[in-house]
Amino acid sequence: MTPNRRVLVMADPNLLAQFVATRLLATLVDAQTQRGFASVVLTGGGIGTASLVALADHPARNALDWSRLDVFWGDERFVPADDTERNDRGAERALLDHVPVTPNRVHRIASSDDVATPEAAAAAYAEVLAQVAREHGHPEPVPRFDVILLGMGPEGHIASIFPGDTAVHAGEPVVAVRDCPKAPPTRVSLTFPSIRAANEAWVLATSPEKASAVAHALSGTSPTELPAAGVHGRSHTLFLLDEAAAGEVPVELRPRR
């Protein structure tokens, strides 16, 4: 297992969402204390959305200066802006409508209302990332995100990088992904170079249907076969699991109680 990769297990999805919210809040507050601003990459899905709800309800949520937070997404469904399938709509309902974020620091991926193709949306988002990176004083094509949140599918996909897809090997920061095996089939996704720009990368997973993929991701499987295996951050990589998702993780990789 990657040296900076850790596994943390909570008893159930509710406790996991509470834990993710608390740890994320603390991490972002620390970043603002050190630099004056913070950045986070959000994900959709059940546990990702539940964690945002828990963050919105957190009693210490105002310890974070929401006006100095840059918000990004790891992937987006290429559908109309008001489609409930969009990850940004889910994040609005769960969190962003309830906290005083600065609108121009919420960096959305273009919808099918905005541009004609997912390739155009990917190119536009790559420019957004590059612009924010420049504003932060970094020469890289993407910002050094403080935390990227990544849900994981039962087949091991993360963001919209699916097993066997060419996106696994992409070198550009953002790509269009067509014919996804999971609906909706047309999407825009960050790639591994962008994911690995994050200081901390967190993979969130619940339910027994993901237990096999989690175990393989932690045991050296190729990212081509199982994209979650290729996730790592600059400083820390966390697999944040409930007991069901951790059910097949080898004992030596599980945290000691």
Image (cartoon, rainbow, N blue to C red):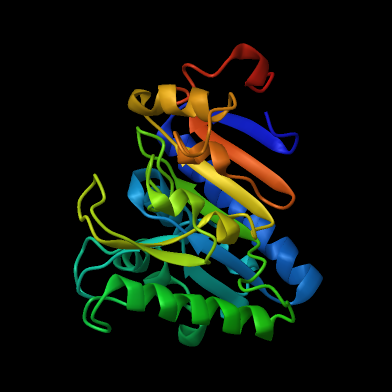
Q: Which quarter shows the N terminus?
A: top right
Dividing the image into 4 quarters, which one contains the C terminus? top right
Residue in front for this viewpoint, 114 or 69? 114
Residue at the location (27% across, 64% down)?
Answer: 86
Q: Is residue 84 above or below residue 218?
A: below
- Location of residue 176 in the rendering, given as x and y in whole percent from the top left corner: 35, 65
Residue 101 visible: no
Name of the residue lying farthest toward the top: 251
Horizontal relation, residue 173 to residue 49: left or right = right
Percent of width and height locating residue 55:
49, 56
User: Residue 40 appears in which quarter of the rendering?
Assistant: bottom right
What residue sits 68% from the left and 73% below the top?
140
In this view, the residue farthest toward the right is 34
Q: Is residue 187 above or below residue 139?
A: above
**Seen in the image, is 94 located left or right of residue 140?**
left
Residue 40 vs residue 144: left or right?
Answer: left
Which residue occupies the foreground of this view, 128 or 201? Answer: 128
**Residue at the spot 23% in from the left edge and 76% down from the top edge:** 112
Residue 238 place in picture, x, y as percent: 62, 40
